[in-house]
Image: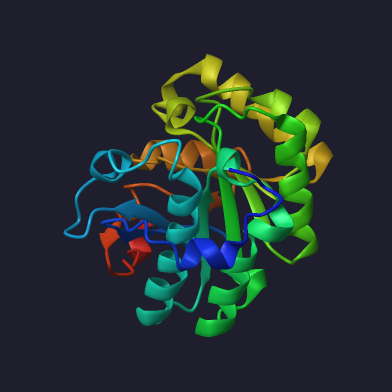
Amino acid sequence: MDSTTTGCGQCRNNSVKFDLSFAFQPIVRASTRQIVSYEALARGPAGEGFLFVKEQINDSNLYHFDQSCRVKAIALATQLGITTDLNINFSPNAVYRPELCIRTTLAAAREYGFPLERIHFEVTESEEVREKRHLAGIIEAYKKLGFTTAIDDFGAGYSGLNLLAEFQPDYIKIDRVLVDYIDENPVKQAIISGVLHTCKQLGIDVLAEGVERRKEYEWLRSAGIDLFQGYYFARPGFECLPEVADSSY
């Protein structure tokens, strides 16, 4: 696809259609005991898992899929009456020119009255980034427009700390692979402590995702992490906004 002729308005009206809906999982801030955002997770129209969705994606429609997800997530979250921020995943390999590819998002935010500063874009580290400089340019452009940015699945996929050398997002999401039984694993504890130290020096916030056990939460909280996500707090709710029990904190 020629990026010089691609217009996001074309993609919104493109004939490519996807069987797509979303589940929403809360992100909580422990110090205030509040849900601060919901992550929009792509699902099939009847709640089918992401594998159902993934089967619809290929190299030729990745751009259209990415654009469709942004619009659908904003529309559905607004319909559900969301009052928090909204986290949307995006594929860096689907963004050709950020100043053009963002137009669909801007139009959807205007249409549904969703403030740009409440949209958080997550780039997943589990997908290989073909051009890190290109991704850095995307992050810079999104920040200038008022979006918050994050690296998802940090520690589980490609590049790791190398991504932080290229650009600095607002926060990173530490993957479940490092969170799992961290209360019993000194090696993981040392790694997380090092990541926290690095992020503090860079002015990057840290979120622990995939938290499933009370002891995991307690260790991570004692280490200084304030943002959390995982089954321990709430499972994703299909086309709904799950609450978090007070006893979780």
Residue 213: x %, y % from top left:
34, 39
In this picture the colour scheme is rainbow
Q: Look at the image and tell me in which quarter the C terminus lies.
A: bottom left
Residue 11: x %, y % from top left:
50, 61
Q: Residue furthest top?
A: 187
Q: Quadrant of residue 245?
A: bottom left
Relative to 110, does residue 41 appear above or below in the rendering?
above
Q: Quadrant of residue 240?
A: bottom left
Residue located 46% across and 44% down the image: 62
Residue 245 appears anywhere in the view: yes
Relative to 59, does residue 178 appear above or below in the rendering?
above
* Count of numbered tags: 0
Relative to 190, does residue 97 appear above or below in the rendering?
below
Residue 50: x %, y % from top left:
29, 43
Residue located 52% across and 24% down the image: 157
> Which residue occupies the foreground of this view, 234 or 103?
103
Residue located 61% across and 37% down the image: 223
> Which residue occupies the foreground of this view, 67 or 241?
67
Residue located 58% across and 43% down the image: 1
Q: Residue furthest right?
A: 201
Residue 123: x %, y % from top left:
58, 43
